[in-house]
Image (tube, helix red, strand yellow):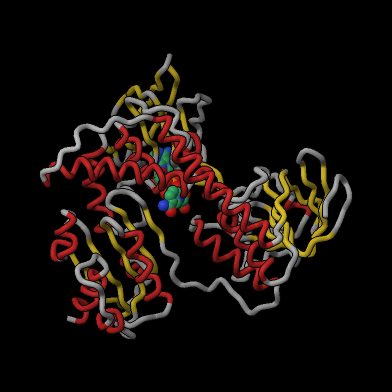
């Protein structure tokens, strides 16, 4: 199809091989459109597979094993102190988890006839891409889908070029287990990777600039996690900024507002992610970027302001979650195939894979209140769950938000082990506009944590 400078035209050129890009390309192929994916990495998977969701969850599984073993002491089972060997751990994460999934994606691409081209793609105009790889290639397309994702945001004004100051990508490589780790940012990444390093033996200090961890999430859901990290971490400083970072020998000195200068062996910066929309040649096309965040502006069909360009995933804005990108990717492929598809989902679940996990979908209680909706809220404490008791984990909460007039479930929040799996049923309830009665009258297996959603529904009905 593309050889050297030879130009051919494809139906769909997908720029970026992460979950948004590969989902779009696979769906295009299924619908009879010829699709190629261009990725600088020359393999499918993107940030999610190589430097995000997957490696972090592999390491969080290890953290969970360590903390379960620790908890087992209370149950009369003592496994002794864990001895951690980084080489086998890295190898397992890299080869048996990431490598295996990458090979799986490559074989799906092959089976579906989706070509993956290695190189950096830059738009030359609304129908041409230049690909800077081993050779300079040109590709013409009827439509392009931009799925270039996001990258870790730097710490404003405090960039320090030192291998001891890591972003999430570097931290997931597990270069070592630092004795003292400073985590800057109390969001998804700070909490997940802070949990991993603390379980592996680091003394973790976390600083968050706002008054609470996970800003934007209902406080009653965050509380059990906060109590846990306050025990697991050496220190959690809220409403605290880092005002200076400097390298001193093999240490990093950080000035924490109100705490003075402290020394750490490594620092993890996790203060958000930024859209990768620059240096793509988008200015040669009609696509428009948002003023805040530089996201590519799209409608519910993934259309940009340029009729030939579509975009999906993190590069189109919040929430920057792989499953949102995947759904958007499938929608755009269906739109290109002439189907009446739209990204009109009401519930996009979010999960923080800490211990306990926090998951939510639809409207939070705070959002419902901010929108002045008349809602009924029910909170089912896991202290009353038989399954939670058998797990020794009664600190969870399942919270249901319903529209008071229609009785429909409009939001659910869960904190507790397994919340990330439990949120699936809640998402289906919100997406299909289930009534609280439907959830209450559905038979849930006993004894399971899934019953807590039913119990919350029953409680709401009084
Ligand atoms: P985030 O937006 O979740 O959290 C960043 C945190 O850093 C916020 O609490 C913010 O108040 C704080 N902060 C910002 N500037 C700071 C400063 N100078 N000093 C101290 N604190 C500061 O961002 P993240 O944790 O970097 O994650 C980025 C994105 O990646 C997330 O928004 C999410 O979309 C995605 N992600 C998802 C998952 C998941 O689905 N489980 C996991 C990891 C990342």
Q: Is residue 40 visible?
A: yes
Q: Which percent across, then down, holds residue 170? A: 49, 34
342 lies left or right of 236: right
Q: Determine the residue positioned at 31% across, 60% down.
A: 419
Foreground: 106 or 24? Answer: 106
Q: Quadrant of residue 231?
A: top left
Q: Determine the residue positioned at 26% across, 50% down.
A: 225
Q: Which percent across, then down, holds residue 98? A: 51, 45
Residue 413 vs 377, above or below: the answer is above
Total tally of numbered discs in the picture? 0
Foreground: 78 or 158? Answer: 78
State the quadrant of the C terminus.
Answer: bottom left
Name the residue at the right extreme.
6
Q: Is residue 243 visible?
A: no
Foreground: 413 or 259? Answer: 413
Name the residue at the top extreme.
249
Foreground: 462 or 33? Answer: 33
Q: Determine the residue positioned at 25% across, 47% down.
A: 226
Q: Quadrant of residue 435?
A: bottom left
Q: Which percent across, then down, holds residue 11? A: 77, 65
Q: Which percent across, then down, holds residue 430? A: 39, 75
297 lies left or right of 165: right
15 lies left or right of 354: right
342 lies left or right of 15: left
State the quadrant of the N terminus.
Answer: bottom right
């Amino acid at each position: 199809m593309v050889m050297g400078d030879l130009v051919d035209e494809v139906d769909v050129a997908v720029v970026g091989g992460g979950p948004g890009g590969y989902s779009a390309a696979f769906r295009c192929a299924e619908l009879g459109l010829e699709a190629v994916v261009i990725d600088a990495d020359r393999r499918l998977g993107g940030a999610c597979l190589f430097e995000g969701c997957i490696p972090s969850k592999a390491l969080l599984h290890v953290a969970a094993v360590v903390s379960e073993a620790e908890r087992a002491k209370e149950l009369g089972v003592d496994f002794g102190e864990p001895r951690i060997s980084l080489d086998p751990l890295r190898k397992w994460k890299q080869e048996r988890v990431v490598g295996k999934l990458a090979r799986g994606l490559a074989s799906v691409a092959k089976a579906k006839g989706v070509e993956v081209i290695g190189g950096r793609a830059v738009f030359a105009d609304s129908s041409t891409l230049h690909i800077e790889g081993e050779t300079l290639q040109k590709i013409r397309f009827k439509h392009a889908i931009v799925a270039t994702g996001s990258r870790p945001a730097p710490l404003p004004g405090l960039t320090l070029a030192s291998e001891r100051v890591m972003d999430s990508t570097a931290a997931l490589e597990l270069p070592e287990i630092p004795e003292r780790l400073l985590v800057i940012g109390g969001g998804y990444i700070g909490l997940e990777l802070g949990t991993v390093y603390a379980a592996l033996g680091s003394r973790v200090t976390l600083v968050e600039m706002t008054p609470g961890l996970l800003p934007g999430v209902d406080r009653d859901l965050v509380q059990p996690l906060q109590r846990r990290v306050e025990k697991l971490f050496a220190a959690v400083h809220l409403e605290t900024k880092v005002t200076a970072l400097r390298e001193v020998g093999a240490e990093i000195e950080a000035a924490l507002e109100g705490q003075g200068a402290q020394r750490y062996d490594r620092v993890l910066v996790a203060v958000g992610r930024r859209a990768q929309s620059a240096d793509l040649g988008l200015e040669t096309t009609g696509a428009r970027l948002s003023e805040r965040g530089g996201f590519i502006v799209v409608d519910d069909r993934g259309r940009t302001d340029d009729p030939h360009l579509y975009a999906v995933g993190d590069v189109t804005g919040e929430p920057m979650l792989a499953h949102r990108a995947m759904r958007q990717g499938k929608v755009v492929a269906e739109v290109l195939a002439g189907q009446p598809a739209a990204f009109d989902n009401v519930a996009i679940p979010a999960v923080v894979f800490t211990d306990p996990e926090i998951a939510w979908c639809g409207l939070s209680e705070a959002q419902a209140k901010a929108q002045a909706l008349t809602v009924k809220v029910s909170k089912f404490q896991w202290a009353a769950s038989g399954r939670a008791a058998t797990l020794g984990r009664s600190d969870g909460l399942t919270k249901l938000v319903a529209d008071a007039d229609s009785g429909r479930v409009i939001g659910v929040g869960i904190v507790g082990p397994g919340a990330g799996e439990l949120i699936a049923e809640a998402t289906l309830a919100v997406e299909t506009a289930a009534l609280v009665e439907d959830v209450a009258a559905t038979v849930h297996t006993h004894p399971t944590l899934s019953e807590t959603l039913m119990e919350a529904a029953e409680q709401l009905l009084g």
